[in-house]
Image (cartoon, rainbow, N blue to C red):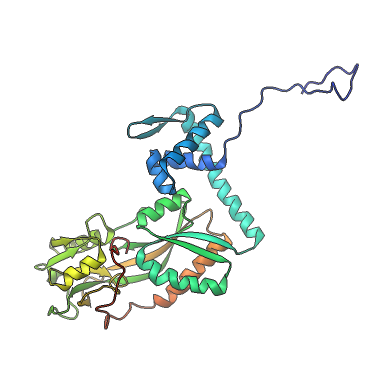
Amino acid sequence: MCLMPRSGLTSENLIPVIGPVPPTLPDARKLATFVEVARRGSISAAARAMLLTPSAVSQQVSALEDECGVPLVERQHRGVALTGAGLELLKRAEEVVRLLEQTATAMSQLNGETAGRVQVGSIASGAAALLLPAITVLARSAPRVTMGVSTLEPSESLEALVAGSLDLAVIDVYDHVPVPMPTHLVAQEVLTESLVLVSSAEDDLPERPSLAAMHDREWVLPPANAACGLATRYACRSVGFEPMVRWETDDLLLLAAVVARGEGVALLPRRAAIDTVAAVKLRRLSDPDLRRRILTVVRADTAQRPILRACLAAIHHVGRIVGDGDPPLDGLAGRHAAPGRRTSGS
């Protein structure tokens, strides 16, 4: 800093001489959007993950470029590519976003107030079996905490969780179908349940059939890109046969109706099969014992926030109660399911 000469020194002429004014500091919200665009490789993919419109995401990226004074992305026919400046900013932007989440968690813990809204993405059966009872538990244990719930596929929930548009995800993982889990996410198992064989009520199968004995049966399956459908196909192949798929659908209501008509058999998670509308019979397999796990997932940087800890405690409390062994199979045929309920992420 250089000051005016001492002679004639007054408050009016004591003016510091400084260098050029630095550029405007980037806005944190725009940085988070930029990070998501960089991760997804396109404006539209980032918009889906953040539950925003492509126009809103594009405007935020453009505004960030204006703030930084340099182009950050090259808009191409199929997505975007980062410029040199964009690659350099990404290193720092990821650190900033992570630090902001850690700071918000620390402030929330210091504040000590357990109040607020938690956005949850959940598979349908997890929402019914875990989240509805957990809301009742929360009303007693943390009455100022609320949950907003969206039923989503596990992959969609994880994407939104990474993007920051969800605070918590309830997903399922099937035997032999691993789910990629980013290192900055924390997963905890809530419960494990068996897959059961679903057949028409008139089918004279043994009470505990083996999967290998189903080699000559026709099947009603979710698509191969759905976790349940993929797990069933893998299990059949592992015992020596390729399932003969007569119907393929991810609509649980249609699947149950087709099975009830004797068009084939299916494998479903125990709690996904509990509310089907049809005269169907549920049987446990004697071999193999196929299972799915239901997990809660949060970001590591937010896992200790009081409101998230309250929700996780409520969900896992319910899980310990409802997850104490598989539900009985008797007396379930003819229960009602919501129309259009999906088996993928069910």
Decide which of 302, 25 is in the foreground and name it.
25
Q: Position of residue 211 (x, y in %)?
A: 17, 70
Decide which of 244, 53 is in the foreground and name it.
53
Residue shown at the point (34%, 56%) measured from the top left: 179
Decide which of 42, 254 is in the foreground and name it.
254
**Extreme-left residue of the structure:** 216
Image height check: is 215 above or below 298? below
Choose top left, top right, bottom left or bottom right for residue 295.
Answer: bottom left
Q: Position of residue 307 (x, y in %)?
A: 56, 62
* Left or right of residue 42: residue 314: right
Residue shown at the point (38%, 34%) measured from the top left: 80
* Left or right of residue 76: residue 243: left
Q: Position of residue 103 (x, y in %)?
A: 60, 50
Image height check: is 329 above or below 295? below
Quarter of the figure with the N terminus: top right
Task: Mark yes or no: residue 183 visible.
Answer: no
* Left or right of residue 276: residue 108: right
**Extreme-bottom residue of the structure:** 331
Image height check: is 216 above or below 31? below
Residue shown at the point (44%, 75%) measured from the top left: 320
Image height check: is 46 above or below 255? above
Decide which of 79, 288 is in the foreground and name it.
79
